[in-house]
Image (cartoon, helix red, strand yellow):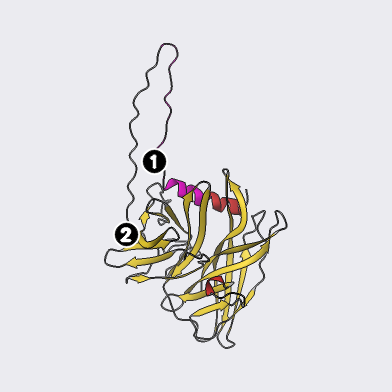
């Protein structure tokens, strides 16, 4: 199974868990005679609980706000995340709903000891999976002002998948140089069959952004994970439009009339610009069939 298939399996399994109840056991018969089928005891369906103080999607959020977002390459808007300080709850809108709905714990998920809660549901039909969290002890996964969220909804034979980066807006670098490193995850126009259902392939990897305030330059490099049998081995680095002090950066596409379709668009996150979020779109050649596909997704990175 490819790296992309592993990602799909994880997302789809979580999506299915969000809508599943208990086991559907079959009674067994003893040897000889007429066996009676005992009435099974119903398995209670766990009740979702709202995200609370221990489940911080954006770890240092303390004031009510609609977070900045990137990676929403969808005509219907993608995923948007908001925080309500008085109740300590998070809410989202998504392509299936234009109104904000509360984010709740997926009751069928349990994190490993010491890990934060990273799997949530919305309205019983939308699954959110956090790729990073301020609750992780691993420094590579510990983000305090931003997050990378993969989401899925729908049912067979159509499952929509997407990746959105969200964060607290912050100031850009004003002097010197800085290197930000993190991770990206994208959805491909290539389709794979998962348990009989055609779904978008997905793959991930590492991202690096280098900013030089004295030269007003910025450069982005993506390195796909090496385990995928259909994923690209490399993606051509790109120079970004950015100047010292600016909180936004991008790679414009002259043929696009909207920034939602720019190859790269992002911004700094955190009170001192310690982290950043961005959306990315690029073409690549699949090692599986030699064809050209488009990948669209998002990334987070930090100093």
Residue 193 visible, this angle: yes
From the top left corner, tell me how far across and down residue 95 is, in percent.
45, 60
From the top left corner, tell me how far across and down residue 148 is, in percent.
48, 64
Nearest the eye: 131 or 9: 9
Q: Residue at x 46, y 46 (%)?
A: 16
Whether residue 83 appears in magenta in the rendering, the answer is no
Residue situated furthest top in the rendering: 33
Where does label 1 land, which residue? 21
**Which of the two discs, 2 and 1, labels the residue nearer the N terminus?**
1
From the top left corner, tell me how far across and down residue 179 is, in percent.
56, 76
Q: Which residues are magenta?
A: 10-33
Q: Residues within 10 Å of mark 1 (few under 14, many from 20)?
A: some
Whether residue 14 appears in magenta in the rendering, the answer is yes
From the top left corner, tell me how far across and down residue 223 is, in percent.
63, 65
Q: Residues within 10 Å of mark 2 (few under 14, many from 20)?
A: some
Residue 233 visible, this angle: no
Q: Quadrant of residue 295?
A: bottom right
Q: Residue at x 30, y 68 (%)?
A: 85
Q: Quadrant of residue 120?
A: bottom left
Q: Do the residues under discs 2 and 1 have CB atoms within 8 angstroms?
A: no
Real-space CA distance between mark 2 and mark 1, rounded to the nearest whole angstrom: 24 Å
Q: Quadrant of residue 81?
A: bottom left
Identify whether 214 is placed above or below 259: below
**Which callout, 2 or 1, points to the residue nearer the camera?**
1
Where does label 2 land, which residue? 52
Identify whether 223 is placed above or below 265: above
Q: Main secondary structure of the magenta part?
A: loop
The disc label shown at residue 235, or none: none
Element on which disc 1 rests: loop
Identify whether 296 is placed above or below 19: below
Element on which disc 2 rests: loop
Residue situated furthest bottom in the rendering: 214
């Amino acid at each position: 199974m490819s790296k992309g298939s592993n990602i799909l399996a994880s997302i789809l399994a979580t999506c299915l868990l969000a809508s599943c109840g208990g086991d559907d056991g079959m009674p067994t018969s003893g040897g000889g005679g007429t066996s009676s089928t005992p009435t099974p005891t119903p398995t209670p369906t766990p009740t979702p609980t709202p995200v609370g103080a221990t489940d911080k999607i954006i770890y240092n959020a303390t004031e009510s706000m609609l977070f900045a977002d990137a990676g929403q390459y969808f005509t219907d808007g993608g995923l948007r995340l908001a925080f309500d300080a008085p109740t300590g709850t998070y809410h989202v809108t998504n392509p299936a709903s234009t109104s904000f709905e509360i984010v709740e714990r997926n009751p069928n998920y349990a994190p490993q000891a010491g890990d934060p809660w990273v799997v949530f549901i919305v309205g019983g039909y939308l699954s959110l999976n956090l790729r990073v969290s301020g609750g992780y002890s691993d420094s590579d996964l510990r983000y305090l002002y931003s997050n990378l969220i993969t989401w899925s909804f729908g049912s067979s034979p159509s499952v929509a998948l997407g990746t959105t980066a969200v964060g607290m807006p912050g100031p850009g670098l004003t002097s010197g140089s800085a290197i930000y490193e993190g991770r990206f995850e994208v959805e491909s126009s290539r389709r794979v069959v998962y348990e009989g259902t055609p779904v978008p392939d997905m793959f991930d990897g590492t991202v690096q952004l280098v900013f030089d305030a004295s030269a007003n330059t910025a450069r982005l490099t993506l390195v796909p994970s090496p385990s995928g049998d259909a994923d690209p081995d490399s993606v051509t680095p790109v120079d970004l439009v950015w100047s010292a002090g600016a909180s936004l950066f991008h790679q414009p596409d002259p043929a696009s009339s909207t920034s939602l379709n720019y190859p790269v668009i992002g911004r700094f996150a955190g009170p001192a610009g310690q982290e950043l979020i961005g959306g990315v779109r690029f073409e690549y050649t699949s090692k599986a069939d030699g064809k050209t596909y488009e990948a669209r997704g998002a990334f987070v990175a930090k100093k």
